[in-house]
Amino acid sequence: MKPLNGHSGTDGFAVADSLLKTLDLDSLGSLLSLGADVVFLVDQSSVVSQVYCASSDLSEYGLSKTIGRRLQDCVTVESVPKIDSMLSAGTSRHPVRGYQVNHKCSGKPDLPVVYSAYTAKDFPYTIVVGRDLRQQMLDQQRLVQTQMELEADYRELKEAETRYRTAFKVASVAYVMLDGERRTILDANPAASTLLSSTGAPLSGKSIRDLFVRDDRDRVGDAISEARHSPNPVNLDGVRVAKGEPVSLTIRSYRENGITNVLLALWPADQDEESKRQRTERPTGGNAVEIADLPEAALVTDPEGTVLAANTLFLDLIHAPSLTQVLGRNIASWFSNAAIDIRVLYTRLLDEPSVRGFTSTLTDNLSGENAVSISARLNPSSSTIQLIVIPQPTGSDRLTIPSPGVPDQADGFSALVGKVPLKDLIRESLDVIEKICIEAALDQTSNNRAYAAEILGLSRQSLYIKLRRHGLEDYRPGTDRQG
């Protein structure tokens, strides 16, 4: 071992041991607290003799009042056996990560701390070193909450997938989803397998050309190429499948993960009613050209909200398979949970030439909800409304709701109307009222949290959760309220 300052490593430990023995208890505790959040010096009767806290924040939990009491009496009931095991002289093995215990704190949530105990020969105290776990517990709670939200989103996605998959399979019309680049079949419903295959075998992975007679393959290939670059569906009649049966086709392009693929609808050529139903289209006029090159999701509607045109970015935003599934629908279809917002927006456009930064919640075709900001203008020459829809990042700042009692409170609320959804205004206002009620209960009970929970009709745990949500954990009666 390489010497350190003229001493071997073993000599260095001996010197450190001799120096520590010269320290008084206050100095020793202060030294240990430099690397820990809390330090206890416990005598052989498990009575706390000294306490050292690294921060004043921990002192507010009443740890200084543990002096002269048994450490077991300062923790919650389920933590007592852990303290007994930690301080037991007969315990040969201790957990490597220490003992996690909870301290009882009047008027506050329990304080989680992980402790490790150390003893030395001829030293009259057991040194108990603790590390504050509050931040770790908060991180764990956030992780669990995030995991629960992800699982809920995943369940909703699976349920939506099941619904669409069921509709896809039971449809009487043959549908084929085609890779737009390689022209191979991605998926096909049972009706397509029956119509295109003599054996009814699955079609996935097969080339679309192989399912038609040789003379019609080029016609089908040209129609697919045209459909990939056309905003409107391409129709094809009198095409014979490999079995020799004539069929009619409607070919539409759709967006999937930023790639243009193709959806084919096929039915026997003699079904005139199906041909009429599949080929009923609304003209798009020049509106599609106006918004096609915009860098954000955009659409054009008439004054009643019926969609006349939409660009591909809007299709991606709402997860729409093709433009034909958007045209002719009312814009409120994607704001089903915020229909009032859209009515407010269109009403404002009657008085203002344009509206910017209007916030709402968009519901896509997979039932997912996204916060969006909408800018809109009324085109007087064509009597159409042009809208740009911009997704907003999650976790955005909460609304600034005027506090009750402040001057011009009504003006503050009226300034928010039309800029944020009504339901958000109501939700945030209820939060303000809830906070005021909790503060009043704490004032009436002189900050007795248990009594305050009782008069509010809440459990203590629910009250603590609401205190944290409103930032009232350290609230004291008589302090200034902030709404």
Image (spheres, helix red, strand yellow):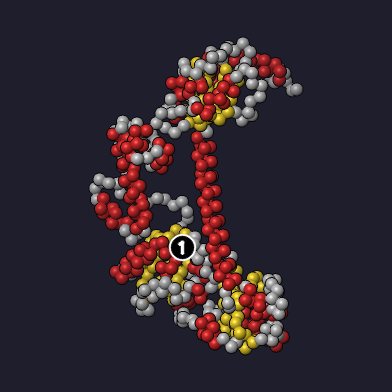
Report whether 207 appears left or right of 274.
right
Report whether 101 appears left or right of 423.
right
Q: Nearer the viewer, residue 321 or 394?
A: 321
Residue 208 in picture, x, y percent from top left:
68, 77
Where's the N terminus, which quadrant?
Answer: top right
Give the number of callouts: 1
Can residue 255 be seen in this snapshot? no
Residue 310 in picture, x, y percent from top left:
47, 72
Residue at 47% from the left image edge and 59% from the top image edge: 369
Q: Considering only vertical position in the picture, is 236 above or below 462?
A: below
- From the image, tell me which residue sits under label 1: 363
Q: Say what amino acid the circle numbered 1 marks.
A: Thr
Residue 32 in picture, x, y percent from top left:
55, 22
Where's the C terminus, which quadrant?
Answer: top left
Q: Considering only vertical position in the picture, is 442 above or below 53?
A: below
Residue at 25% from the left image edge and 45% from the top image edge: 405
Q: Nearer the viewer, residue 33 or 247?
A: 247
Report whether 26 appears left or right of 238.
left
Q: Considering only vertical position in the picture, is 238 above or below 59?
A: below
Can residue 339 be seen in this snapshot? yes
Residue at 71% from the left image edge and 18% from the top image edge: 10
Report whether 355 appears left or right of 177.
left
Instruction: Report which quarter residue 451 is drawn in.
Output: top left
Give the residue at the far right of this rendering. 1
